[in-house]
Image (cartoon, grey):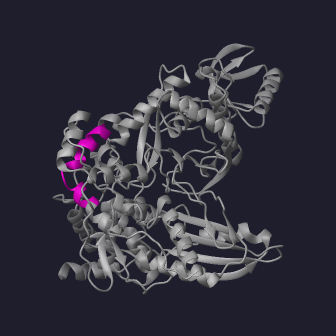
Amino acid sequence: MTGSETIGGPTDSAALHRALDSLSPQRRALLAQRLGLTDVDGPPPVPVVERRPGIGRYPASPGQERLYYIHGLAPDSAVYLMPVVLRITGPVSADRLRSALVATVDRHESLRTGFALDGRQGLTQVVHPAGSVAPEWVTDEIYPDDVVDRVDWWRSRPFDLASPPLLRAAFWTVVGTAVPTAVLALCVHHLVVDGWSTKVLVDELVERYTAASEGRPAAVPDLRVQYVDFAAWQRRWLESPGPQQQLEFWRTTLASARGVRVPSDRPRRVDQSFAGSAVRLRVEPSVVAGLARSARAEQGTLYMALAAAFAVVLRRWSGQDDLVIGAPVAGRPRPELESVVGLFINMIPLRVRLDGASTFDEMLRRVRSVCLDVYAHQDVPFERVARDALGERRGGRSALVTVMLALHNVPVAQIRLPHVDIEPVDLPRGGADFDLTLALAPTADSGLTGWLVYSADLFDPDTAERFAESVREVLAAVAAGVTAVADFPVMSGAQRRRLVAWEQQRGESVLDGHGSRQPIGVPGYLHIDGRPAGRRARWCADGSVQLLDDGDDAETPAIAETTETAGTAADAAPVAARDDLEEVLTRIWVDCLDVPGVGVHDDFFELGGHSLLATLVVAQIRDVFRVEVPMYFFVDAPTVAALAELLRATGRRDGIDVDRIAGLALTV
């Protein structure tokens, strides 16, 4: 999940609460009466956590816990490394830029934060004092043709999460150009920033550089609070009765929902992988203007129009009328959080039911209604929604939210430095945490540009390009005033001509339920010589027809169905620990799960465990045995017996007698 803001950015929410804070209690009561509400008060101000001199240790936020867990599943993946790359034309001082970056790191605690696992508290933020850490800063000379490869290398190197800052910078002078040219590349781990934070970071870096050039103090906003204050404030709210109403909303809203399954080129892997690639998308200004007109006609927003168009494509490719689309939201409900660097972003699932919707206007109205409903229930972190409302306990990829739509509406001011021109370099994500993510951002000419990021485990590049083609065609059709859903093209004219030629050669066609041609790779109903053949099939890229069995493009089980089997392992007679190592692991599980007993073959997640408790178990195992236990060990071996064998194998490799340590631990 990247730093994208969609339905409501922090400027909207923060401005509203700033206005409410300025009202007297009497005026707030009058406003509530006129709006027909019992209360219009927003969340209370964020209090400041007591600080002590030296290194501080504070609980991580739920969002950080989930990201840390996923990082443990694929520690070498670049999926949560966030690059910021600026091409600078003109004379610029690398030393002054570096000083500005160091000052920015000193100002924001998140940029001085590492992470540690504690056997009792779980994941903690370890905040180092200002002036005690400095970001890696590399300078070099490169040729113009080497820029892309160097950036790819720079952003793909993993961080040691225990060693802050989780930020590095490079300043490369580009040689052989007519005018002085340089590239400033920053790479930050998503654990300490989101998309809004990268804007804060760049804006402050530019202001500090400019102020130093002009010989004046930097004009940066006051920071009343830092991210650890927000994390503590959020945790207190989550422990109160407040989240229960929102969680009940999500349980009701998402009951029996299914994840979107776009037909893939390969079966879904059992293990977690975040390999991905991307296809560039460009939406012309005239198309954006048409989308905005459609949205205004239904009192909606550009994001809502994009979501409705995205739903048209997903419906056609997946054959599902009931869709769940992930939508990132800013997660900054208070004005004092606007200028804070940290991981605030949250994701909310948009469940859009399209059955019976025959026009785009009707689809847009449904999307608008869904967006307004979920916006009022966006405060609970998705980690809690997934665990408590959906029953997803193993972490990693969500079975329900498999596609994402992001519109980066973070207000980006023109980046200026004295006597130089700066051009941000738009880069795709380095990996994929969803099957498909459509991420768009405004351009200077009022268009949109972005990427369709896709899972390389599931899709070939040609398939991803055809899906992106479908998105372009549907967006253009909406802007052109096409209203009937059945009339929306989901393929280019070139692909349509290829299909017509194949149909004439073979006498076969693949149609959807309404008699429209299906794109290459998308399942439909086979017709031979114009008559239904009673089989499902799809066109392959080589012009052949693949016949499908009933389960070849089946949807995932509904959420209610995926949680019905929980507890079956626990219902069987438990097998007690058979040696000291299994006994120690059993006691750790009992302590973390707060259950009376655990059998060595009981599945941790079926006993009520979840990803955050798994992190706590791994921390306690490390504390006791002094053995590094990768998170994927625990996911692959979620029973005491299997984990004990993995620990023995790891101990033999590292020269550690885990059985002896277990015996000593029991004696102590």
Work out whether residue 261 can be spotted.
no
**Does 412 appear above or below 668?**
above
Span highlighted in magenta in the image: 234-251
- Number of marks in picture: 0
Residue 236 inside the magenta-drawn segment = yes
Q: Residue at x 18, y 83 (%)?
A: 668
Question: What is the x, y in percent for residue 216?
Answer: 52, 80
Left or right placement of residue 252 versus residue 329 in this view: left
User: In the rendered image, which quarter is residue 60 located in?
Assistant: bottom left
Question: What is the x, y in percent for residue 205?
Answer: 54, 73
User: In the rendered image, which quarter is residue 7 located in?
Assistant: top left
Left or right placement of residue 173 versus residue 416 in this view: right
Residue 149 inside the magenta-drawn segment = no
Work out whether residue 278 can be spotted.
yes
**Does 524 appear above or below 155?**
above
Q: Residue at x 24, y 64 (%)?
A: 592
Q: Residue furthest top?
A: 531
In this view, the residue in front, 266 or 216, is 216
**Does 161 appear above or below 595?**
below
Left or right placement of residue 12 versus residue 575 in this view: right
User: In the rendered image, which quarter is residue 191 located in?
Assistant: bottom left
Q: Residue at x 68, y 78 (%)?
A: 92
Question: What is the x, y in percent for residue 94?
Answer: 64, 82
In this view, the residue in front, 255 or 543, is 255
